Amino acid sequence: MPLEGPILLTGARGSLGEQIQEIWSATRIKIIATDRAELDITNLELVDKLVAELKPAVIVNAAAYNNVDGAEDPALYQIALAVNATGPTNLALTAKKYGAKLIHLSTDYVFSGVSNPVTVGEIATIGYKETANPDPINAYARTKFLGEEAVKEVGGEYYLVRSSRLFGPLGSSPDVKESFVHLMLRVARERPLLKLVNDEWGCPTYTPHLATALLSLLTKPYPFGIYHLVNAGGGLTWYDFAKKIFALAGITTPIESVPGTVYSRPASRPGNVTLIQTRGPKLPSLDQGLSEFIHLLPNPSSD
């Protein structure tokens, strides 16, 4: 479906934001890319002014505070709350006011994972469908949940998209966080043995594949509402994901399976938060996404 106006993108210098720009550049869609320096989404007056001026057909909110442990600090929690809850509220209000569609990105961490037991080492084929009720168990997750609730309460024409454990080319923002794939490739060269958590399941998702699926939401007749967009193949643990990474990258650093309780982390982590997709555009398999990404990297198995 053709879009009658430009797209306003927030979080444009993040890893997903930059992939959205790159993937969507092959179309005739005009993207107005903003990051924190260009638009403070926590300021309703500024958001309203810019949306009124630009008249976008769609607002895509890829901005987020995603320091899970940092959000447990009361001062940093206020920042997380502003970006993850107040920001989406402001974008939803202005989108509805000026007749724009909204795509808001959220996370699997809005679920606790406690009701989805999985045998260690197995691929998770049970998890949360789009209709499941969130039950966040840490501060970061609560801010993302509040953002979701605000988007739903404001209403209008919105796509609320949950995804999981994003990896892909890094964005250029100074605040960008390396993905698990980047982390594993780095620490495999620094340590003789890696101990990786084997009781927390999720669906790692390749950002170019997610960006392509988001474009499909806008250009094909998908109804508004909640979508789970993740690479196909089911959920797996950090330990099993690392095994896939090392196999493709030709890395032989030994890894050991450990429970999450081995590590002292400020924020509680969900158990099995595998996202089950029942609607919307299908993404390729995790194996395909990981293979594509590993082959983009320069000699990942070399020292």
Image (spheres, rainbow, N blue to C red):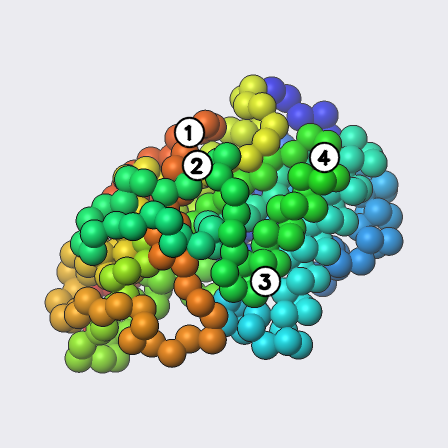
Query: Residue at coordinates 22% horizontally, 73% vertically from top-left?
Result: 194
Q: x, y (%) of residue 225?
A: 59, 31
Compute the Cα span from label 4 to label 3.
Answer: 23 Å
**For the residue marked with disc 4, what is the amino acid?**
Gly
Looking at the rendered structure, the secondary structure element under dot 4 is loop
- Give the labeled residue for mark 1: 278
Mark closest to the chain's N terminus, 4 or 3 = 3
Q: x, y (%) of residue 196?
A: 25, 68
Is mark 1 in CB contact (under 8 Å) with mark 4? Answer: no
For disc 1, the neighbor class at 10 Å (few under 14, some 14 to 19, many from 20) is few
Horizontal arrangement in the rendering, residue 135 relative to residue 11 (left or right): left
Compute the Cα span from label 1 to label 2.
Answer: 7 Å
**For the residue marked with disc 2, what is the amino acid?**
Lys
Mark closest to the chain's N terminus, 1 or 2 = 2
**For the residue marked with disc 3, what is the amino acid?**
Tyr
Looking at the rendered structure, the secondary structure element under dot 3 is loop
Q: Can you tell which mark lies on residue 155?
A: 4
132 vs 77, nearest the viewer: 132
Q: Is residue 57 visible?
A: no
Horizontal arrangement in the rendering, residue 210 relative to residue 55 (left or right): left
Q: Can you tell which mark lies on residue 129?
A: 2
Compute the Cα span from label 1 to label 3.
Answer: 28 Å
Mark closest to the chain's N terminus, 1 or 4 = 4
For disc 3, the neighbor class at 10 Å (few under 14, some 14 to 19, many from 20) is many
Mark closest to the chain's N terminus, 2 or 4 = 2
Q: Is residue 165 above or below residue 217?
A: below
